[in-house]
Amino acid sequence: MGMMKTEASLDEKAIVAAAEKALSDIAAIRGEVSKVIFGQESVVENTILAVLSGGHALLVGVPGLAKTRLVTTLGEVLGLAANRIQFTPDLMPSDILGSEVMDQDDSGRRSFRFVKGPVFAQLLMADEINRASPRTQSALLQAMQEYHITIAGQRYDLPAPFHVLATQNPLEQEGTYPLPEAQLDRFLLQVDVNYPELAAERQILLETTGLGETRPAAVIDAQRLIEIQTLVRQMPVSDTVVDAILALVRSARPGQGNASTDKNVAWGPGPRAGQAMMLCARARALYEGRLAPSLDDIFALAEPILQHRMALTFAARAEGMSVRDVIAGLVKQAKG
């Protein structure tokens, strides 16, 4: 028994030591990103949290708010091999996954050879993802969920780590396809990108219209990122926090005894929301320099984790309510 206890405490010590090293790496990542992206702290935080948690993020905002720039910056700072796809209505699955081409060798024998598409990257930027057709969306869906693709019955594994950071413009109505609910659920977080604060916008004007442009430096590499992602999964989560996650996610589902949810919510978040919350809460603790997640992490993450995993009833929308209003109400109830 004594032996087991010693092993456990050794494990704890090792996790604490690894966490402290991760804290300094994450602080360096934050510092490097802030040299290029001004303001937008919560956007930067949530996007980095999605990557540290090993997941994908959907950035939603009007054009020109540095969504694409943030993703390319993250690719450079995290030392990941990055590719970018501009989604258009005529984009085909093969434009993402790759295609088979006919080869002929010296003796005249012909055979097919698979030429990999841009999805074979560690960081895939899917720009204006809602502009492509459902057929093309589904090609990306398998990659996001299963980390491999299938072409002509042959399986091809994607590089590790593999992250999709997608952007979406909420204003465009024509020529867009709403993302299927199943695909939205695959995004760990939906990050809303709003207009910058005055001071940040002043800095943007001064820093980005001169001759020199600041280039971010790589702080870590893909291997180190995988180590931090593994650490995030090893961090302990107290029963109080687990109970709070369950209570919050379940309160967002109709038919679970929450009167305002029953009235306003058509369908609520599934178990993936709780899984996302468990991972992101640990990553957020590290991001903020702590070794264990707290209730504050849960409340802060409620909106980015839940908002794309639930829908309001027609009556609630007619009254001018938004999903964010409902989530804010649930958080308020949870805080008691």
Image: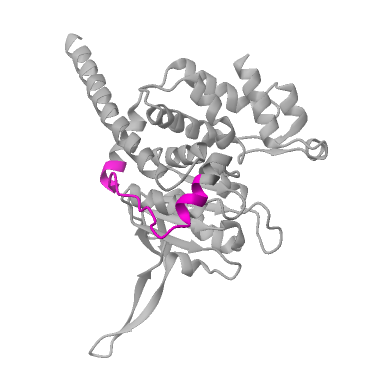
Quadrant of the frame with the N terminus: top left
Q: Is residue 233 visible?
A: yes
Question: Which residue shows up at 33% across the image and 52% down it?
Answer: 80
Colour convention of the picture = one colour
Question: Which residue shows up at 48% across the image and 57% down it?
Answer: 209
Give the residues drawn in magenta, as a range: 203-225
Q: Is residue 220 magenta?
A: yes
Observer-nearest residue: 281 or 31? 31
> Going by the image, does 268 lie left or right of 185?
right
Number of marks drawn: 0
Seen as rendered, the residue at the extreme top is 2
Expressed as whole percent of the image width and height from the top left, the position of residue 276 reads 49, 35
Quadrant of the frame with the C terminus: top right
Q: Is residue 139 above or below residue 227?
A: below
> Going by the image, does 158 lie left or right of 137?
left
Observer-nearest residue: 311 or 271? 311
Expressed as whole percent of the image width and height from the top left, the position of residue 319 reads 82, 36
Expressed as whole percent of the image width and height from the top left, the position of residue 14 reads 22, 24
Observer-nearest residue: 98 or 33? 33
Question: Which residue shows up at 19% across the image and 14% down it?
Answer: 6
Q: Is residue 164 visible?
A: no
Expressed as whole percent of the image width and height from the top left, the position of residue 40 reads 51, 40
Seen as rendered, the residue at the extreme left is 3
Q: Is residue 166 above or below residue 336?
A: below
Q: Is residue 336 magenta?
A: no
Q: Is residue 188 above or below residue 248?
A: below
